[in-house]
Image (cartoon, grey):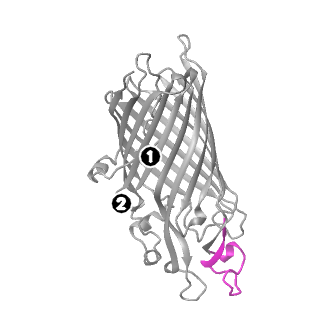
Amino acid sequence: MRLFTCPVPQIFPLALAAFSMLTGTARAQTIDTPSPSDRGWRTRIELQVDAEYDDNVFLLAPTRKPDLASPSAGDVTSGRFRGMESAGDVITDLGLGIAFRGPGLTGRTLAIVPSVGYEWYAQSPERSNLTLGLAMEQALPHQDMVRLRGGIVPSYFQKNYLSDAVDVSGDGVITNDERIYARGEYRETSAGIDYRHRLVKETSSRSTSLWLTVGGAYSSKRFDAPHQGRDLSGPTASIGLKMDRGKAFSVQVAYSQDWLDATADSQVMVLDEPDFGQDLNGNTTTTDLDVRVAGTVDRSRVERAGGARVDIAVGRRSELRLDYEHRWRSFSSTEPLDAANRGRRDRRDQFGATFVSELSRRVRMHVGAQRGAQRLDRLIGTAGAGDVDDYTRTQIQVGLTCTCLSTRGRR
């Protein structure tokens, strides 16, 4: 779980950018069982600092990335890239998590873990954001565990989206400077539950253990006006298996599915008449490009993701993590003019590698990289949407996690 990022001096992330990696994922707090001689509450504070270079923070098509550095006059007038200063950026994360551990049900460990995070974007600071989280983990017999979790992102600037278009010239065709873009900013909340069960126990004669994890969650994303039609909410279900082979290596596989609902909403679009075979601007022809249309848009969809991760021990205090995820999305819109979503299918593949090393008993370091690519399969193009396309993305990251303070309570 990413904890958080902070506006430290810019020289720090620039110095680390050459080494950065995926998103700053802090090692999750784990439950341990108090010894019989120590059943009091304990406190553990973890601080994580990451620096990441992301070459495509706004998930733009390769042909659009240079436009942020040198926008056209029309893009400046329309506000298409306002606040989006650079396709690539250096992101500094600072995360703080505090784990309170003590006796819970039947005397087994209960952990309460509030966390706070902040991401600071060096090139596009308007995208900087705060994250608040809370998790409660209850240890169960046979090393099983149940966890409740929740999180809030109070405000997040995703990018600018088309909100209107005005045909100033009256020719029935919308030019770049006649489009109007507005800030796409949302608030996100989520809550979920996970259950971990040990299927196979490691013994003196068998060095393998096997774990099953199942979970469910509900998330809600609410956009500020005028983009309420982009609101999404719905449940998620997940299942995973993990096999540990002693301390030598572990293998994990996981699958999740999200059912995300959106309210069909009227939206201004800029479409090409030949894609629809219709006269959209009322001039008796069906060959015009870039025509203003107000039509219904439905962003409801089902998202599925499957992946695997392998952790391999490298010496006594280090490990190498290799991971892969494939995500595919199916959009359910049947609206006839919904060019961006009707018949849309997404495919995204992500590969990553991370090296983790314990520098001392209290300090861990991780260095890694991730490469992702999305490909779309749509029945019709998204000529006027401008907010979804094929893209590639590379992230490089380096970070430190420090157990700053650990206190042990009395009986």
For the magenta stretch, what is the residue range? 271-297
Which image quadrant for residue 126? bottom left
Residue 396 pos. (x, y %): 40, 46
Q: Is residue 40 above or below residue 70?
A: above
Q: Residue at x 73, y 64 (%)?
A: 334
Q: Residue furthest top?
A: 205
Does residue 25 show up?
no
Can I make out residue 39 in this image? Answer: yes
Image location (x, y in percent) of residue 94 = 36, 46
C-alpha distance separating marks 2 and 1: 17 Å
Amino acid identity at mark 2: Gln
Q: How many marks?
A: 2
Question: What amino acid is found at the position of numbered circle 1 in the picture?
Answer: Thr
Q: Is residue 123 left or right of residue 283?
A: left
Mark 2 crowdedness (10 Å alpha carbons): few <14, some 14-19, many ≥20:
some
Q: Position of residue 365 (x, y in %)?
A: 35, 35
Q: Which residue is mark 2?
A: 123
Earlier residue among tags 2 and 1? 1
Viewport quadrant of the C terminus: top left
Helix, strand or loop under label 1: loop
Give yes or no for residue 334 being in the magenta stretch: no
Residue 23: give its label.
1
> Is there CB contact under 8 Å for labels 2 and 1?
no
